Amino acid sequence: GQALVVLALLMALVNSLEILVFNQELELDHGLRGNANAALRRESLLGMVCALVGMIPASTSASRSRIVLAQAGPLRQAPRAHAAIMLGVALTGPWWLHWVPMACLSGGLVLAGLMQVPRLMWSAQYARSSRPTWAQSWLVALVFAVLGGVGALVTGLVVATFVLLRDSAAKVLRHVRLDGELRSRRLRRAASDSWVTPRMNQVAVFELQGVMSFGVAAHMSEQVRLRLLPRHRWVVLDAGRVPAWDSTALAQLRALVRDLDQQGIAAAIAALDPLAAAHVGEGVRVFADLDRALEWAEVAILAQRPLDQRPPRGGSDPLGEIGEGMPREARQALQALLLPQVVPAHGVVFNAGDRDRDLLVVLSGHITLVTQWPPERGLRLATVGPGMVFGEMAFLHGAERSASAGAERGAARLMRLPRERFDGWARQYPEAGLILMENLAQMGARRLAVTTRQLRSMLE
């Protein structure tokens, strides 16, 4: 009884798989869309009828064989006719089948089995170009020939699992950037940027993809270790394309971070899904996205600057980068026109769609520009720090604000330059006004270059 139950379950599983594969082949190779569920219900009923009369409906699986597609073509009626012939043989066989020589039956079965093998599997060129797939397919076929359907089914499941893990591991690294191609959206003044840019090749970024299990994570860790160069001091793992991590994969991640830290390499992971982030452990640096992780690496690079090369702290230059090269008298006159503003933590400077035309200079703190405020609901466009200017687009051509700006972390102090005050000052100091406009143009060119570099890195 137990053997019959196991055999029935096996036949049901094999029958379902064959129906799905046959209908998929009809649709993909021949453009004929079938109803796999209806076929499964119909043949399940047929199987029960066969069982009631003492027959095992194994032969009905031939109705979806490659023989039908090869001989009758991609027709929905051909499998039904073929199944009817097979059932007719099963019903009438006791009266005439014993007259057929056993050699003929064996030869017919062997030929039928050989015709089931795709022509591609006999190709020597395919065997050379796709040796693993070719070998695995023949392994399952030989197990089926020697041990029967149960052994072949188990072997096929094992091979399929192995292939899935191998393919997932082989593609776990979607992109690897070892030369500092990526930068954060944190904007910096020219002196700071000139220090960071040539040292970004110390930052390695690995973009991950696929579901992370133990085997895949182990392969990922091994590949990260092998690809790192002696110059690398920071590693960022971008997990934005990883939908799930299991506990063993998180253990591999913690081990990788620990090993890199022992080598003097700081590691961080970006865009980790919330469930995994809650269980990854305190020893792993986690950032909301790749942009924040890159900013962390840039801040660490800037911290290595000698003290004599660091800019003065915010508050010493109310005009910031727009006042560079300006005559002293005109500079003092312009500073007298500035309006101070204190922005509390999480406070808003302006929202997208506002119509004011003020130019703003950061004295202390940082201002984040996003598509929508608060930052959690939008995309970060840029972050500016002390001495830097923002709001220049509305200041220059009077259009409405295209983004929202505010103090995302701590409080910030600003200086506002209303457009009408600037116009009056520029009429009094026209040469200084040209210098200010030239500084704005250079600032815009640097920011455009940063945007272009980021876009190129995303497209490559």
Image: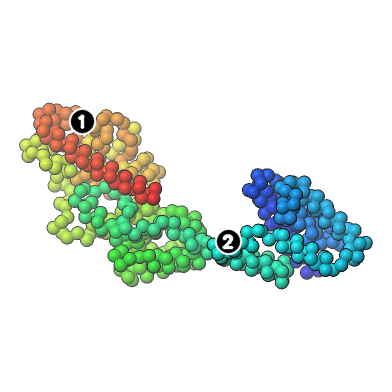
Is 299 drawn above or below residue 231 in the view shown? Answer: above
> Residue visible at 35% across and 47% down?
456
Q: Nearer the viewer, residue 365 or 435?
A: 435
Do the residues bearing badges 2 and 1 touch, measured as CB atoms within 8 Å? no
User: Is 95 on the left or on the right of 209, as rendered?
Assistant: right
Outermost residue toward the left in this view: 329
| Residue annotated with mark 1 | 419
Which element is circle 1 on? helix
Q: Which residue is depicted at the point 32% across and 70% down? A: 263
Q: Label 2 sits on what residue type?
A: Tyr
Mark in the foreground, 2 or 1: 2
- At 57% from the left and 62% from the top, the residue drawn is 125
Dot 2 or dot 1, earlier in sequence: 2
Picture layout, residue 8 above or below residue 24:
below
Q: Residue at x 33, y 38 (%)?
A: 403
Q: Nearer the viewer, residue 145 or 430?
A: 145
The location of residue 223, given as percent across then percent down, is 42, 65
Q: Quadrant of the N terminus?
A: bottom right
Where on the picture, by quarter, is residue 297?
Answer: bottom left
Q: Is residue 198 left or right of residue 253?
A: left
Question: Which of 112/169 is in front?
Answer: 112
Scheme by which the image is coloured: rainbow
Q: Which label number is shown at residue 126?
A: 2
Q: Position of residue 340 (x, y in %)?
A: 19, 39
In the rendered image, the residue lying farthest to the front is 124
Helix, strand or loop status at disc 2: helix
Q: What crowding class fits label 2: few (fewer than 14 Cα within 10 Å), some (14-19), or many (20 or more)?
A: few
